[in-house]
Image (cartoon, helix red, strand yellow):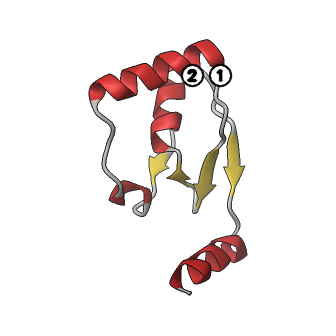
Amino acid sequence: MLTQHKLSAAFPSMSDADFQALAEDIALNGLKQPVVIYEEQVLDGWHRYAACVKAGMTPKLTYLEQDEFDKMVAERKA
């Protein structure tokens, strides 16, 4: 099981009702947007990841490399 990256944890959690609706939607329709992994943790898509786990599904993952992360941070500072 993956853990939530500290940058992801800076965003508020979904309400229980919203999370339940997300889990039901993913179970019915599949995961449409992959979960982003950085430093072996979930950087983006924590709720999607948890909803997949709850639904017993293996989530689609995409891995962010260090240079991609550095570029993303630099763009947001500009």
- Residue projecting furthest to the front: 78
- What separation in Å lies between label 2 and label 1 (alpha carbons)? 4 Å
Q: From what the image shows, is residue 32 above or below residue 36?
A: above
* Local SS, label 1: loop
- Residue projecting furthest to the top: 28
Q: Residue at x 46, y 33 (%)?
A: 50
Pointer 1 local density, CA inside 10 Å: few below 14, some 14–19, many at least 20: some
Q: From what the image shows, is residue 77 above or below residue 11?
A: below
Q: Which mark is residue 77?
A: none
- The residue under label 1 is which amino acid type? Gly
Image position, residue 72 (x, y; %): 62, 73
The reply to whether residue 67 is in sight is yes
Image position, residue 59 (x, y; %): 63, 32
Q: How many marks?
A: 2
The reply to whether residue 56 is in sight is no
Identify the residue under disc 2.
26
Q: From what the image shows, is residue 46 above or below residue 10?
A: above
Q: Residue at x 57, y 22 (%)?
A: 26
Image position, residue 9 (x, y; %): 36, 55
Image position, residue 54 (x, y; %): 46, 22
Position of the C terminus, as image quadrant, is bottom right
Q: From what the image shows, is residue 63 above or below residue 66?
A: above
Q: Given contact means CB atoms under 8 Å apart, are the residues at marks 2 and 1 in contact?
A: yes
Identify the residue under disc 1.
30
Q: In the image shown, does 5 or 26 lie closer to the viewer?
A: 26
Q: Residue at x 34, y 60 (%)?
A: 10
Pointer 2 local density, CA inside 10 Å: few below 14, some 14–19, many at least 20: some
Q: Residue at x 35, y 55 (%)?
A: 11
Left-right relation of 77 to 36 = left
* Local SS, label 2: helix
- The residue under label 2 is which amino acid type? Ile
